[in-house]
Image (cartoon, coloured by chain):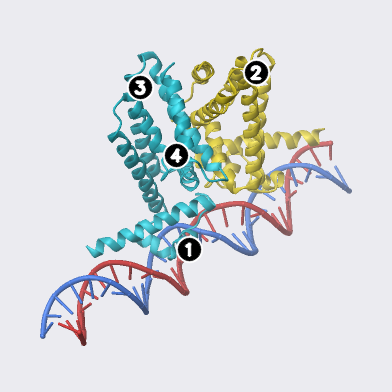
Chain colours: A cyan, B yellow, C red, D blue
Amino acid sequence: MSRKRIRDIRNEELIEATIIAVHKRGYGVVTMAEIAREAGASAASINYYFGSKEGLMEATMRHLLGKLRQAMVEGYATANTPRERLYAVMDANFSDGLYTVPQCSIWMQFWANAPYSPRLSRLHRINRARVRSHFLAELRALLPETQIETARQALQSYMDGVWLQAAQSETPLDPAAARAAAHRVVDLVTTA
Amino acid sequence: MSRKRIRDIRNEELIEATIIAVHKRGYGVVTMAEIAREAGASAASINYYFGSKEGLMEATMRHLLGKLRQAMVEGYATANTPRERLYAVMDANFSDGLYTVPQCSIWMQFWANAPYSPRLSRLHRINRARVRSHFLAELRALLPETQIETARQALQSYMDGVWLQAAQSETPLDPAAARAAAHRVVDLVTTA
DNA sequence: AATGATTTTTTAAATGACCATTCAAGTTTC
DNA sequence: GAAACTTGAATGGTCATTTAAAAAATCATT
């Protein structure tokens, strides 16, 4: 019990520190020592817990993917129509807990580096497929077959693009405004 | 004359090699030696021509930005209406010469790394502002004031998002299809 | 509660690679 | 012969990871 807990606490601390440090310095440049300093620990202890730098990065991405999935599940619980569920997907992506500069920044770093790491690229692929199938399921109820793929690509690209820009932002983000804008895009795409 | 020419030839060769090598290995990981090998030259000669690794990266990005700008100018020449000019911006982004996996891949690497390099981030900012003002100018002729900003963000995010996905693609891209899809998105956004 | 054995956690220092950049000495071009 | 170009070999530095040893926590036994 207590054995488990200490490890979990450290994992969480180190992952938080990773998010901050990668945001500050960039994925390709950040060092174990910097992450360790951010967490108030030593570089060696990171290896003790995560095995390697890549292991830490994978764990960090898993953590973020988990948060995203959870936000989505919560939104789905109260959505009753296809359109509300589309809103829910957007709301999850732009939720207060996720749509922050450091996290968008991290996400972009992962996107950029996924192709060069089998472990990251696997996570990335899985997540993307999940979002895609959610979109398709709802769009099928709203649009004729011929328009579905265009709409899906428009929505998914929009989401990605907004995150991409958010990652570059020098000022804090406004998640509520992002959600409102996303709703308008959903409306646009589904009322064509 | 020939003095100029040799330098230009080398620059072009080395930039091409950089695009290939960065695509293959990733911006943060690629080494001067790898780029040199790709170009059939030595690492030292890259420093002779570009001063440093960062100089090479900046030159490579300038090269790509130039291509993009040129494609856009060409498109504008034959566009006569605001909507056609919006098409032209999209067509430039998804032109045959630019919308390829290695180039989208490079672009994403630059996006991800721009925040950590003043030289790159400057280029990035300038380009983004240019695209933004093009969009705004045309949208003002097509939409009421209140909808312009939403539309602009939708279009620009869409473009970014499509490139992002293209960078991950394992198969060659279909620029013509991308242009057609982009036109549909323009139509969608401007007929709301 | 106290004691000592056992396991878990921590880190300073060592290790072993790797790499951008420089330099000096060549080669080619004009 | 001078200027432009090229590169192999040094240089100096950085960094992930390992190691070994210490410190802390946990547990078993009395």
Q: Is residue B12 above or below residue B53?
A: above
> Same subunit under labels 4 and 2?
no
Instruction: Give the spatial CA distance, label 3 vs label 4.
Output: 29 Å
Q: Quadrant of the N terminus of chain B?
A: top right
Spot occupied by residue A69 in the image (x, y as percentages of width and height): 33, 40
Q: Measuring from the top left, give residue B170's x and y in whole percent.
A: 43, 30
Of A117 and B46, the residue lying toward us: A117
Residue underneath mark 3: A139
Reading the image, the residue beneath label 1 is A37
Contact (Cβ within 8 Å) of mark 3 with mark 4: no
Question: Which structural element holds mark 3?
Answer: helix
Q: Which residue is mark 2?
A: B75
Q: Is residue A51 visible?
A: no
Which chain is home to disc 3? A
Tags 2 and 1 both on a single chain: no
Secondary element type, mark 1: helix
Q: Chain of mark 4?
A: A
Amino acid at dot 1: Arg
Q: Which residue is mark 4?
A: A115
Calculate the distance from the C-alpha at mark 4 to the C-alpha at mark 2. 33 Å
Q: CA distance from mark 2 to mark 1?
A: 51 Å
Residue B127 visible in the shown view: yes
Closer mark to the observer between disc 3 and disc 1: 3
- Circle 4/circle 1 CB separation < 8 Å: no
